[in-house]
């Protein structure tokens, strides 16, 4: 009896073994992305994100060929994995590493682009989809679905954009694109969550005011929570001085409190992106200066490493998921419809971004006294072009809206998922092949 129990410890069920095999393969692919990305370091157009996408696509092709077209995924997409575990370190490190002087010097312009601009883009994409999708046979979509489409495709890919901009060479452009990207992602997620909470089948003026009020509350409450957690961590570090006994405790507390800010925001149904971003800014300005020198070096590299691995993981998965046979089989009978939807959405993204970048840049320039602080026309073109990329946030929101437990059963939902992935791949590949100057 005892021997059988002991022997059973080394046995695994078939499902457990399949999971371990999948995870092992995925980790091996992550290693390959890091190594190949290093070898291609001198080619600026071939950064880690596009390397991971290409490797993911190649992996999907190999899986399809070796399984006779039956399997194309290693792991099943879970939006909770993305929002709870992968996105926080990316956004926190962005806030932690940002050059605060340049960022806050352009803070009003960043808010103008990231918040007001996103709302303009959201409105154009939603209204355009309502008018143009009626001419295509894509299945039944409700008003909430159209508004969700506006939020999904208003979310830029700040992660990939920042990899083709240099903070030292173009500080103004970097701070504007970077700041707008983070605020844009937060605004898009807040909009998406607000859409899901309200019954939009019968829109009235009262519901519209509640929607706007809920959006403003989420925006400012999330920011204040991030600032509070950041200041609290600085106070604890200063008063208790963990470094006298162990730098490990200092590093651990900073990591845990950074993640606590994100989880608390999610617990209170706020925007975790905004919260953890401003927590990162505050912690880099106050908490970081209250720890020992060794802890400063360790935390800086730890946050950067976590962010780096999360970014590669996301783009690798998006590349593999692009060839998921399940969703493509559903739309295979009407490829023209899928292409039409993707083309319409891509056109709406182009128009929606242009509709706010140029007018809001003009308004921003009116408030600038120094010519060096004004946004020139070439910079406006760069900002417009840089923000056209759609990435992991769009994919995660699309899965949240149009799938059930990672699976796509309805034709309309499958078309929206495939169109989202098509736009993400197209915008990322084309954008990276034309580096920003």
Image (tube, rainbow, N blue to C red):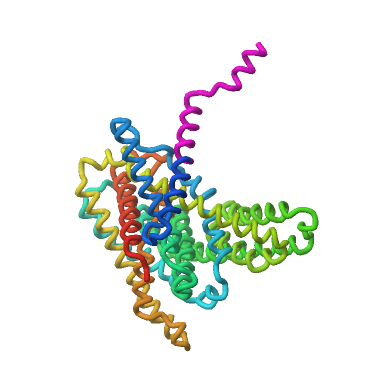
Question: Quadrant of residue 195 in the image?
Answer: bottom left
Viewer can see residue 178: yes
Residue positioned 33% across, 45% down in the render: 413
Pinpoint residue 134: horizontal percent, then vertical percent: 23, 54
Horizontal arrangement in the rendering, residue 101 relative to residue 200 (left or right): right
**Which contiguous range is marked in magenta?**
1-27
Pinpoint residue 41: horizontal percent, then vertical percent: 43, 58
Q: Is residue 315 above or below residue 177?
A: above
- Residue at the farthest top position: 1
Quadrant in the picture for the C terminus? bottom left
Residue in front for this viewpoint, 419 or 161: 161
Residue in front for this viewpoint, 206 or 159: 159
Magenta highlight: main SS: helix
Residue 3 forms part of the magenta stretch: yes
Pinpoint residue 175: horizontal percent, then vertical percent: 48, 71
Residue 267 forms part of the magenta stretch: no
Q: Is residue 133 above or below residue 357?
A: above
- Residue at the farthest bottom position: 369
Pinpoint residue 47: horizontal percent, then vertical percent: 41, 57
Q: Is residue 374 above or below residue 414?
A: below
Viewer can see residue 126: no
Quadrant in the picture for the N terminus? top right
Residue in front for this viewpoint, 177 or 272: 177
Q: Is residue 404 above or below residue 133?
A: above
Residue positioned 38% across, 60% down in the render: 43
């Amino acid at each position: 009896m005892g021997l059988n129990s002991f022997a059973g410890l080394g046995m695994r069920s078939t499902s457990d073994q399949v999971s371990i095999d999948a995870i092992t393969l995925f980790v091996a692919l992550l290693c390959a992305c890091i190594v190949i990305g290093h070898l291609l370091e001198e080619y600026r157009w071939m950064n880690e994100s596009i390397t991971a996408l290409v490797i993911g696509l190649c992996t999907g092709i190999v899986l399809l060929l070796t399984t006779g077209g039956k399997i194309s995924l290693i792991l099943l997409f879970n939006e909770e994995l993305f929002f709870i575990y992968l996105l926080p370190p990316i956004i926190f490190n962005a806030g932690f590493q940002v050059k605060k002087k340049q960022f806050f010097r352009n803070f009003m312009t960043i808010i103008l682009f990231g918040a007001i601009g996103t709302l303009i883009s959201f409105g154009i994409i939603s209204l355009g989809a309502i008018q143009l999708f009626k001419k295509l046979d894509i299945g039944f979509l409700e008003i909430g679905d159209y508004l969700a489409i506006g939020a999904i495709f208003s979310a830029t890919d700040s992660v990939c954009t920042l990899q083709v901009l240099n903070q030292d060479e173009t500080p103004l452009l970097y701070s504007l694109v970077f700041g707008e990207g983070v605020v844009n992602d937060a605004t898009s997620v807040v909009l998406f969550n607000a859409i899901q909470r309200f019954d939009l089948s019968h829109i009235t003026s009262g519901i519209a005011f509640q929607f706007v009020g809920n959006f403003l509350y989420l925006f400012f409450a999330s920011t204040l929570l991030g600032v509070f957690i950041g200041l609290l961590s600085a106070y604890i570090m200063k008063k208790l001085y963990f470094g006298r006994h162990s730098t490990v405790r200092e590093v651990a507390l900073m990591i845990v409190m950074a993640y606590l800010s994100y989880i608390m925001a999610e617990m209170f149904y706020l925007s975790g992106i905004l919260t953890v971003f401003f927590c990162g800014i505050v912690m880099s300005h106050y908490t970081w200066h209250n720890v020992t020198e060794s802890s400063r070096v360790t935390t800086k590299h730890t946050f950067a490493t976590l962010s780096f691995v999360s970014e590669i993981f996301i783009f690798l998965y998006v590349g593999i998921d692009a060839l998921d046979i399940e969703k493509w089989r559903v739309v295979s009978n009407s490829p023209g419809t899928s292409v039409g939807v993707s083309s319409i959405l891509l056109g709406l993204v182009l128009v929606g971004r242009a509709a706010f970048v140029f007018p809001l840049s003009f308004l921003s320039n009116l408030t600038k006294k120094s010519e060096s602080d004004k946004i020139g026309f070439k910079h406006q073109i760069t900002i417009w072009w840089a923000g056209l990329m759609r990435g992991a946030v769009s994919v995660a929101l699309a899965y949240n809206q149009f799938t059930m437990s990672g699976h796509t059963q309805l034709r309309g939902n499958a078309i929206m998922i495939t169109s989202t992935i098509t736009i993400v791949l197209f915008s990322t590949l084309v954008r990276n092949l034309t580096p920003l100057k």
